[in-house]
Image: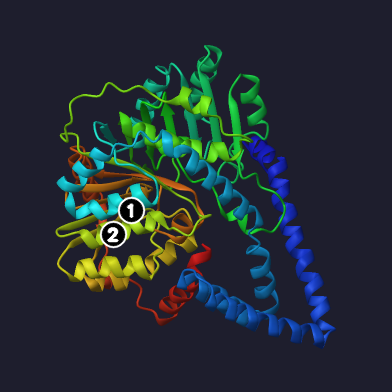
């Protein structure tokens, strides 16, 4: 065990992290020495800080981010100003957005978009018609019908379903996860992927470099490609201070032949199926899409994959298109709308969907999330819903994985509880599920957390469900989870002035967590 741990420490990617720390240290020494002996430099940085603060106020953006940066550049005029300039160099991000815009345009003719489905869904679920319109007409994510949904209330069941479908792949397997870690889960999946590639099935694997930073051997890409699997490591980590390193691929997508797809909160690591224990019992959820909605999920995978292609081939796209046995028009299965969010554009799709659905609620809002770091829009939506008589419940983890993030999440409890929101903490262990259920008839499930990083900095994906019968399964699971959760009361919260002040300070830096 110790030997394996030492090998992790000295892998190249960990050495890169050490280089980042060295870079920070050299940076600090040079600046300290320069400013200490130059009144001119100190004055220059003071004026620069004021100019940056005015620039932040002037430009478009989230108010919380603005306040955070303004505080930093004014309290720490030297470091705050320089960090702002370094972390807001967006050349790489702008190039990526241009590429994504080309891909969105290219995908438009392959969406299998049916206007009659949108019209039927809008009519049947009129209260969500504006959201459907926003996602389909503005953002390019169509509404699909005739898609069977299977809900998995725990990672173990989700994993077994994945294995069962992977062995059935005939044309291709598209695999995209934030975290891939050595262990039982990855070993068994990898074995199937290698067998399928050898049998002529096209296998594309993509994982995030930071997400899998110390969980995979450094030569994983080469090992997979030697077995006939196409592999891409998203946004490789380099020892350069830049904001693009914040833009991680947090998506979880598995597509089999474009006809079946999986998504949810579950990564490829053994704690997600409780094979090993981290932070107690791991509670996670996911769904399987069988039908046209699976193709919408497949296109989300191709978005980032094709940003690393030199050319976009119509021939390839046509070969990926599945053939569905369409039955007569029926809404008995409800409607699904897979969608994605990108940090490179000006649209906060995940937040917009959450806010619109919460505002639409008439009876209930049920939320599962590992983190609760809210901006003004989301906090206002939750408070207003509760104060309007809507039953708002939120389940978070009792056992935390990131102390500062957990403490920041708890800093919102008092305001929410006083407004009438019921806040619970999952006592068995770590709550990692990401879902929102509204009025027993609409839901969102996917990879999006209720925090700044997920809503504004990461590539995310989810599925909006309207009238899907399996929403009942989600509600039943929510009720069962409540039985294993502790309701937080005002008297349970720390009353110390020092603790309350510390939590408020943490909230000032919430956008950077």
Q: How many marks?
A: 2
Picture layout, residue 113 above or below residue 320: below
Q: Nearer the viewer, residue 179 or 382?
A: 382
Question: Does dot 2 land on a helix, a strand or a loop?
Answer: helix
Marking on residue 93: none
x, y percentage for residue 309?
61, 35
Question: Does dot 1 land on a helix, a strand or a loop?
Answer: helix
Q: Is residue 494 visible?
A: yes
Dividing the picture into quarters, in which one does residue 362 lie?
A: bottom left
x, y percentage for residue 206?
55, 35
- Residue that numbered label 2 is attached to: 356
x, y percentage for residue 198?
55, 13
Q: Pick the quarter of the image with the N terminus.
A: top right
Picture layout, residue 224 above or below residue 124: above
User: Crowding at label 2, few (<14), some or many (≥20) Cα neighbours within 10 Å?
Assistant: some
Q: Are marks 2 and 1 in contact (CB under 8 Å)?
A: yes
User: Relative to 165, is 216 on the left or the right?
Assistant: right
Marking on residue 134: 1
User: Relative to 13, is 388 on the left or the right?
Assistant: left
Q: Nearer the viewer, residue 118 or 249?
A: 118
**Mark positioned earlier in the residue sequence (2 or 1):** 1
Q: Nearer the viewer, residue 374 or 427?
A: 374
Dividing the picture into quarters, in which one does residue 145 lie?
A: top left
User: Relative to 368, is 80 on the left or the right?
Assistant: right
User: Relative to 467, is 348 on the left or the right?
Assistant: right
Q: Is residue 10 visible?
A: no
Picture layout, residue 45 above or below residue 286: below
Dividing the picture into quarters, in which one does residue 30 lie?
A: bottom right
Residue positioned 44% across, 73% down in the render: 503
Residue positioned 40% across, 54% down in the render: 349
């Amino acid at each position: 065990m110790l030997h394996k741990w030492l090998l992790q420490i000295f892998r190249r990617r960990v050495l890169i992290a050490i280089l980042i720390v060295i870079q920070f240290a050299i940076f600090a020494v040079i600046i300290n020495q320069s400013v200490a002996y130059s009144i001119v430099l100190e004055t220059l940085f003071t004026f620069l800080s004021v100019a940056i603060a005015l620039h932040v106020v002037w430009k478009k953006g989230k108010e919380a981010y603005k306040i955070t940066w303004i505080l930093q550049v004014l309290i720490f005029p030297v470091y705050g100003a320089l960090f702002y300039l370094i972390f807001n160099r967006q050349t790489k991000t702008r190039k990526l957005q241009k590429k994504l815009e080309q891909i969105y345009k290219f995908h438009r003719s392959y969406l299998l978009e049916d206007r009659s489905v949108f019209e039927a869904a809008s009519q049947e679920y009129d209260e969500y018609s504006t959201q459907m319109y926003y996602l389909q007409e503005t953002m390019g994510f169509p509404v699909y019908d005739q898609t069977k949904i299977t809900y998995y209330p725990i990672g173990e069941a989700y994993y077994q379903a994945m294995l069962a479908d992977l062995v059935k792949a005939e044309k291709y397997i598209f695999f995209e996860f934030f975290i891939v870690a050595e262990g039982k889960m990855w070993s068994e999946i990898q074995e199937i992927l290698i067998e399928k590639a050898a049998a002529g099935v096209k296998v594309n694997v993509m994982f995030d470099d930071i997400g899998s930073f110390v969980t995979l051997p450094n030569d994983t890409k080469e090992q997979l490609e030697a077995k006939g699997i196409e592999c891409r490591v998203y946004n490789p980590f380099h020892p350069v201070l830049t904001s693009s390193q914040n833009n991680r691929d947090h998506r979880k997508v598995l597509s089999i032949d474009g006809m079946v797809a999986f998504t949810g909160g579950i990564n490829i690591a053994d704690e997600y199926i409780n094979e090993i224990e981290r932070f107690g019992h791991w509670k996670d959820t996911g769904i399987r899409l069988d039908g046209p909605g699976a193709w919408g999920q497949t296109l989300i995978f191709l978005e980032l994959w094709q940003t690393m292609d030199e050319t976009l081939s119509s021939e390839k796209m046509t070969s990926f298109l599945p053939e569905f046995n369409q039955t007569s028009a029926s809404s008995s299965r409800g409607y699904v709308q897979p969608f994605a969010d990108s940090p490179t554009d000006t649209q906060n799709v995940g937040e917009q969907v959450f806010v619109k659905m919460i505002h639409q609620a008439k009876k209930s809002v049920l939320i599962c999330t590992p983190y609760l770091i809210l901006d003004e829009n989301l906090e206002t939506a939750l408070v207003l819903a509760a104060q309007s008589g809507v039953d708002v419940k939120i389940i978070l983890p009792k056992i935390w994985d990131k102390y500062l993030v957990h403490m920041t999440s708890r800093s919102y409890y008092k305001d929410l509880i006083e407004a009438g929101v019921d806040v619970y903490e999952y006592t068995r262990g770590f709550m990692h599920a990401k879902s929102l259920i509204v009025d027993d008839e609409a839901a969102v499930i996917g990879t999006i957390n209720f925090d700044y990083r997920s809503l504004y900095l990461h590539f995310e994906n989810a599925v909006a469900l309207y009238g899907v019968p399996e929403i009942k399964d989600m509600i039943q699971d929510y009720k069962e989870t409540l039985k294993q959760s502790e309701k937080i009361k005002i008297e349970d919260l720390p009353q110390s002035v020092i603790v309350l002040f510390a939590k408020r300070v943490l909230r000032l830096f919430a956008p950077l967590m």
